[in-house]
Amino acid sequence: MITCKEIDDYLAYCKAHPKWINRDRKLLIRNIVKPTLKRKDVFFDEATFRNCIRYLEANYYPLFPYQKFVLAFVFMYDSTGEPLFPEIVMLMGRGNGKDGFMAPLANFFQTPLYGIPEYHVELVANSEQQIKDTFSVVYNRLYKNPKFKGKFHVTKEVIENLETGSILRYNTSNASTKDGKAPGCIFFNEFHAYENNDSVNVFESSEGKKRHFREIIITTNGYVREGPLDKLLDDCRVILEGGANPLGIFPFLCRLDRESEAGKEEPMHKANPSMEYLPTLQRAIERGWIKAKGDPEKYREYITKRCNLPQLREEQAVTSWKNILLCSYKDTKRKSVRKSQDTTGKMAIIGIDYADVRDFASAGVLTIDDDGNHKWRQHTWICSESPFLKSIKFPIENVGKAGFRDFEVVRAPVIPVDGIVDWCEKIMQDYAVVKITMDTYRYTLFKTVFEQRGITIETRDNPQGTVRLIRKIGSACGIIAPSVEKLYSEHRIDYGDSAIMRWYTQNTGTLTDKYGNMQYVKIEPKLRKNDGFMAFVAAEFSADLLKETIIYV
């Protein structure tokens, strides 16, 4: 049994302040902390832990109890002598002192007190100014300080401990600029701003080159959806719920449990663990709430940055819920299904979305009836072994009932491509299919099967090929989004009685990127799918081919 005063003190604190502790931290204590303390194969390096506390508090700032609690798990090791939790994730509201914790710890790793020679430390952020500010915390403490004379070589770009040879430096997240220094520890600051994994992958490629490799991620939430942070938080959720933790993540997540808690004094501690120790932070949070209540933009910022609950603007939904219902019903109150013209035999487009072989896949057929309605009939395949199946926010158990007949659960480890192509071939027998449209993701899997079936691929040399590849789905979304929006507002989209298609659409929002291009995004990754909607988008990208041309002779 591992014992540590700082851990015990924090557990007692959480028990004494249940309204200040969010569900994520309660799950952390129950499913990770307490089982870890009982393990006989875990070594707690208490001596280095205490050296760390003394160094940080003597040379930088007093540590808050929750910071000491997290630090204890930084210095726990498995039977091989490697960190038990090589990835520490801390999610906190704005103003909780992330730099003041991160930078001193980075500096400690350089010292003989930690004791690994050439244990290089990288500080990484999306913004150069942002990461310079973090680096400056160490620079300002060491530069011209007689206490550190002869111990560190200090410049505005690099700090080196002269005894260990350990280097501390800062980087932006531009992956093309890295030179492979083989760091021992990487600190990712404001992880929410990362739009992809490129820079993360570059830095992580050094893992295994140095003893005690660590990643420490400290961030607020932000506005980039389906980026690295959303994926990381999904992984954390699985771990906190008691799932496997092969990556050794220690998720210390501070956020509100629900939006209705915003602005209330006690719940705001859930997202802001430093609030009780920083009166200026508490005043800023209180003032921010007063301003946010009457301003939608400030409210969105407050909920995202102070509460760590990401927001999409209401006006950024694909369309209203009423418009979604009108895709299926002629009377939304009585739920009477709208009448659809029979478009069998007409020209058609097939759209496919197949993002994850272990999750959901969708395909659908798009036709245009005589009144100009865009008729969409989709089919979804759901993998029975999806790790998220039990948490999916859709009544899958209703499969086969009225409104729930256009999806199936596939009893297999992955969704087979052949089954989707079988469905496409059946559709091609019933309709005059002019294109099968999909994006580049998983395209190679389909290309082989399509060609085996004699279904041709559209290329520069063969523009009449049946399968059209969308190489940049984001650009395609920007092109068709205005026309799709118009179709919804005019009630000219026909889903039939499809509960899952209405769900897909409800789960999709629109965001405008920094270049002014509109993008479709999942409102909540993993648990609220939009595969069928993205298949619809792929089909709409080729919808101009459905316009019949009259040739006069």
Image (cartoon, rainbow, N blue to C red):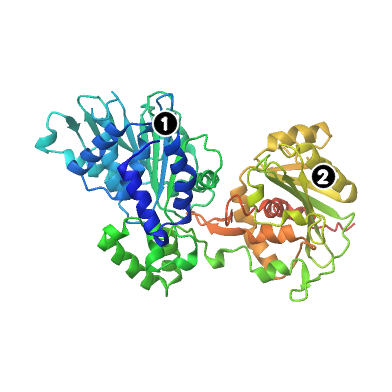
Q: Is residue 42 left or right of residue 347?
A: left
The percent position of residue 540, horizontal first and vertical second, equals: 71, 55
For label 1, the residue is 42
Q: Which residue sits at x=49%, y=39%?
A: 197
**Is there any visible trace of residue 93 in the rendered image?**
no
Quadrant location, the N terminus = top left
Q: How many residues crowd mark 1 within 10 Å: few (<14), some (14–19), many (20+)?
A: some
**Residue 326 visible in the picture:** yes
Q: Position of residue 56 (x, y in %)?
A: 23, 41
Residue that numbered label 2 is attached to:
424
Disc marking residue 553: none
For the C terminus, the image quarter is bottom right
Horizontal arrangement in the rendering, residue 50 relative to residue 92 (left or right): left
Image coordinates for residue 380, horizontal then vertical, percent: 75, 49
C-alpha span from label 2 to label 1:
54 Å
Three-letter amino acid code at the position of disc 1? Val
* Figure check: 12 above or below 203: below
